[in-house]
Amino acid sequence: MAKKKNTVDYRGSQVQALIEWANAWVNKDSFPYKNNRNEMKIAANWCQAFVASAYYAAGINPAYTSLDYASDARKAWGKNSITWQNGKIDCSKIPLGACIYSQCGDDTRGHVSLYIGNGYIIEAGVNPIRKVLLNNALSGRKYYSWGYNGNQQPQGSAVQKTTETKRYLGKFDVTAYCPCKICCGQYSSEVTGKPSKTSSGTTPKANHTVAVDPDVITIGSKLIIDGKTYYAEDTGGLIKGKRIDIYYDSHKAALNSGYGHKMCDVYIVEGDGTYSDSSTSFNLEKKSTATIPDFNKAEKVKLMELDKNEGLTLKIVHENVIYDVTELCYDSIQLVTKRKANPGKLTFKIARDLIPAGGVEFYEGDAVALMYDDVGLFWGYIFSKSRTKEQIITVTAYDQTRYLKNKETYCYTKTASEVVKMICEDFNLQMGEIADTGYTINERIEDNSTLWDIIYNAIDFTNIYTGKYYELYDDFGDITLKAVDENRLPIALVSDDNTLIDFSCKTDIDTNTYNRVVLYRDDEDSGTREIYEAQDTVNEMKWGVLQYTEKVSEGYTEGQIQDLCDRFIEIYNRVKRTFTVEDKGNPNVRAGCGIWVQIDDVGEAINAGAMVESCTHTFKNGEHTMKLEITCEEVVE
């Protein structure tokens, strides 16, 4: 029997709470002592209090460890020494959430910070609190080791496996500088009489050091510019926004570098974010499995409450900054929803020339929200961007159900609603209303199937055996399962209505029409196969044989299997009628909802309920239209 693999991740753990607390105070000059905002500590003076407060806030160590404890910590953590490898600190044995101890001089109390993964630490003892590469922060220190505050290991802590990947940051204005007075002014070694130092305290090196805006690129980041590798170690008064200054040893070399305000593609090199030990695995970078649930809740509230969102509003959330890009859109905004195994898809274009200087930043994985007045139409994530010669950026985003393309193996005896909850919990997808489907599917095995297929197989079996059908969709960031008969809208499409732009009708037996059903199961003991069949011989003569074949699980009786055959025929032995209708837009309409259709000019009059199979909303030049594919099914007796 297939068995779901046992994976545990850091989401919801003490490690997550630890990192989120520490991240919240980056670039601040004080922090709440033991998470008490009434008692704020000055960042520059309290590295130990910062670490202890983070452990306290995350529920890891309720006992505050004082500054005097640092010397004892050094002894306790002595066996966990940090080594250098190929000129860099080896982070492969440092667990996420560990405290990094280093000694600057003879004072054995030294300095302590928090390791947050991918080679980065967050530290106080400086002003403001900063996130920086461990390799840069510890350069030149006397002693290094790691351990846990109060020797209390956070739940979810794990060592890191890192492989480098690069992420595109965009085009930057790249210039060159050297340590002379012309380039560095009062900070020049010519003025100070001391060896040159970067703002991060390192010694600048040609073909290595660059100056960046720390609000755009984190100090210590590894960058690729024009195919060469550099490190963000310095800052500058004129280096703001998307500008980078490359260091050279002499003014002549800087002048001859070719970097006189040259626009270059810049990439940041990152680890893959995957951590593991004998019982732990998670991915820090995938929005689907790491940051969606809490992120969804927090940011959706902001989007819905900060503004009244009158009319159409399109917003992008990048690193908790909300950008309203409605007025930057070029041409049209299009939202497409389709029934079954199709994620909601939002496509829009932004004219780069309309983006104000230092304005909007967005990357793959950033959240996107589309709203119409108080209706949340779409909440999803950017999956692709493309740019034309005219600098028109086309953005494609998908809702949360896009992650149901993942494959997995399950063996279960559950209802369809329990299957949905199981998958959402395993893949950390945010859930909304999940209807109780009632019917239990016995001993179902899904081997290396997409999550979409697993869920819809369960829904189809429920429909066949109970006659009740359910729709799965993303409702503004919440996976929702709702009975079709509870998803009907009080909306009618009428052919003589002035808002109806166009319509057409198609009938077919080509899609999901079957007049013969074969179900079977294998008896491993006897080596035989039991076959059960239902058919409509009249329609076989009319249409030819349209056969559906399915293997059933061991848990069904003969009578139940025969009932399944009969239900298949009852549901799928019919002519399918599809209408394509274009009408004035209604933000409440999406694929999977029911509406009423009254159209007279399609051969025979239609006056009946219909299912929306697909819905395309188009917003262009202040107008909102929708194009629907709807079905009215006629069951052949």
Image (spheres, rainbow, N blue to C red):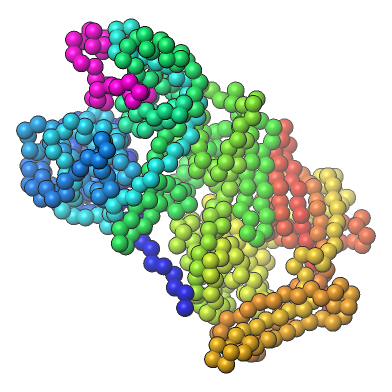
Give the position of the C terminus as an image quadrant: bottom right
Q: Quadrant of residue 575?
A: bottom right
Query: Eyeballing the image, is 443 above or below 424?
Result: below
What secondary structure predominates along the stretch shown in magenta? Answer: loop
Q: Nearer the viewer, residue 338 or 449?
A: 449
Q: Is residue 341 visible?
A: yes
In the displayed structure, 154 sits above or below 103; it is below
Tell me where residue 511 appears, x and y as whole percent.
Answer: 77, 64
Residue drawn at 45 percent across, 32 percent down: 267
Residue at image coords 33%, 25%:
208
* Place of residue 265 in the rendered image (x, y in percent of width and height, measured from the top left): 49, 27
Figure disc tally? 0
Q: Residue at x 44, y 70 (%)?
A: 4
Q: Is residue 479 above or below residue 84?
A: below
- Which of the pair 504/190 is nearer the observer? 190
Query: Residue 207 colored magenta?
Result: yes
Q: Is residue 456 magenta?
A: no
Q: Is there any visible trace of residue 96 in the rendered image?
A: no
Task: Describe residue 350's horizontal placement relative to residue 22 as left or right.
Answer: right
Q: Which residues are magenta?
A: 183-212
Specify the farthest residue to the front: 86
| Residue in view at x 22 percent, y 40 percent | 84
71 sits left or right of 222 in the view: left
